[in-house]
Image (spheres, rainbow, N blue to C red):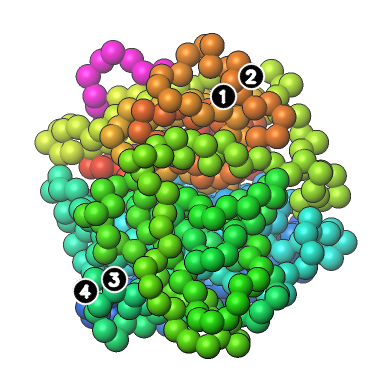
Amino acid sequence: MALFQSSSTSLFLLFHIALLSTLSLAADPTITFDFKLSYITVSPLGVPQKVIAVNGQFPGPLVNGTTNNNVVINVRNDLDENLLMTWPGIQMRRNSWQDGVLGTNCPIPPNWNWTYSFQLKDQIGSFFYYPSLNLQRASGGFGPFVINNREVIQIPFAQPDGDFVLLIGDWYTRNHSALRADLDSGKDLGMPDGVLINGKGPYRYNTTLVPDGLPYETINVDPGKTYRFRVHNVGTSTSLNFRIQGHNLLLVETEGHYTVQQNFSSFDIHVGQSCSFLVTMDQNATSDYYIVASARFVNESLWQKVTGVGILHYSNSKGSATGPLPEAPSDIYNQWSAMNQPKAIRQNTTASGARPNPQGSFHYGSINVTDTYILRSLPPSTIDGKLRATLNGISFVNPDTPIRLADLNQVKGSYKLDFPSEPLNRPLRRDTSVINATYKGFIEVILQNNDTKMQSFHMNGYSFFVAGMDWGIWSENSRGSYNKWDSISRCTIEVGFSIWTMCYRICGMLMFLCCGKTISVLEISCTLFLFIFYLLIHLL
């Protein structure tokens, strides 16, 4: 029982609030799922290993909902350690209790159930779910989450002939417990053993790099038809370049927001990000085609084995895919691609989202900023004998009582509302330090990456406008380069090394911003950190 740090009264309040939320929205349809998380043994890279399955499946089953649906997911923890399931990017209507992260929820102990209950807010798009504790996502437990438009709201393109989900991500043959032990001892995760596509290893495009007999993903299509590909990077630490041999990728959506439609020959998808592409089957069928996800912003010659390969199979195909893989952009000769591509992603201001009014009608560029925070990440440093990551010199320490519960029950000393708004010249330290933001304030957040590696930043339960990005150090003059008209709104953004990124967000509830070499670990402070915008709101 010590695993639950709150009192029985607190747990009753949590249940009571969730129940009221569901009952108050009972007029909308309810979709119900039962999830049982357990271990199974699979060999995606030819090595038998224990992975986390959902209902015996790896990856887990699709959660398919529609705007305004009430979602009820009963989670049974059959693992040998605590569990929390999170739904990143899902904007729950006035309900921060269901986020499934340690800052708001108590862990689910082994052999326990917990029922998540929330309503899909005014939202559409492509997302995924995963376990948020103990680096468990490195062993699986993830699956796709799709929110469809209501029938009265048109999508801004012709209805596709089919819909495919591709979960791509780096993969280690060591399980999450071994990886966690390495991190706790101050080691780096090291090079992944490969990249999986929908839980499967690569097609044997190279007899030296790929062993014989690995299962691989095959997507079956018909010539002349157009399909929607929802691609998610569910990996642990590696940015991936996604491409389909001989086919254009028409970008139409990122994490719940329709984009200005642009064709790409390949597309970088960073840890935690989700994108939708329309792909037209306009090639001849002399052979199958490669689907490729390869490591990005690394030494490509050394990381050649870290490549996922699937097969696009036309129904009238005359043979197997052959020859070399299509090439990704060169990191050595085209470093600007790290910035040019994200700058090119803009919001489709003429398209409706979950509501009839266009998404771009929210004029974020004309709202007065109430607070500015410059968040600087540095290479991991030794603090208290362990290698730890920091933001503004602070490595976050999770409190015994989740912060939202501590606020509700007035638990004194659980956290400090003293996070600095800019980097300070003082020794690095560990602390439970959070931002005291203003309810309905409009905050400007500058993510300054002074680490030597790509970082992924994620805001749980909300999205933000990505209004600026550039090389070097942000300054007051940088505001002149902001896009204040059609910036894309996302829940996860990459920040390259020696690059700054600026995001806008209205403060409306408890929010999380996670970053580091992986966004899947929230509690291992030796290499990662959980940073919290904490808003003193008692009505949620």
Quadrant in the picture for the N terminus? bottom left
Q: Earlier in the sequence, mark 1 or mark 4?
A: 4
Amino acid at the residue labelled 4: Thr
Amino acid at the residue labelled 3: Asp
Tell me if label 1 and label 4 are in contact, CB under 8 Å. no
Magenta extent = 421-430
The tag on residue 208 is: 4
Residue in view at x 79 percent, y 64 percent = 158
In reply to whether residue 104 is colored magenta, the answer given is: no
Q: Is residue 176 left or right of residue 101?
A: left
Asked whether residue 106 is in view, the answer is no
Q: Is residue 112 left or right of residue 507?
A: left
Label 1 sits on residue = 444
Label 2 sits on residue = 369
Amino acid at the residue labelled 1: Glu
Tell me if label 3 and label 2 are in contact, CB under 8 Å. no
Mark 3 vs mark 4, foreground winner is 4
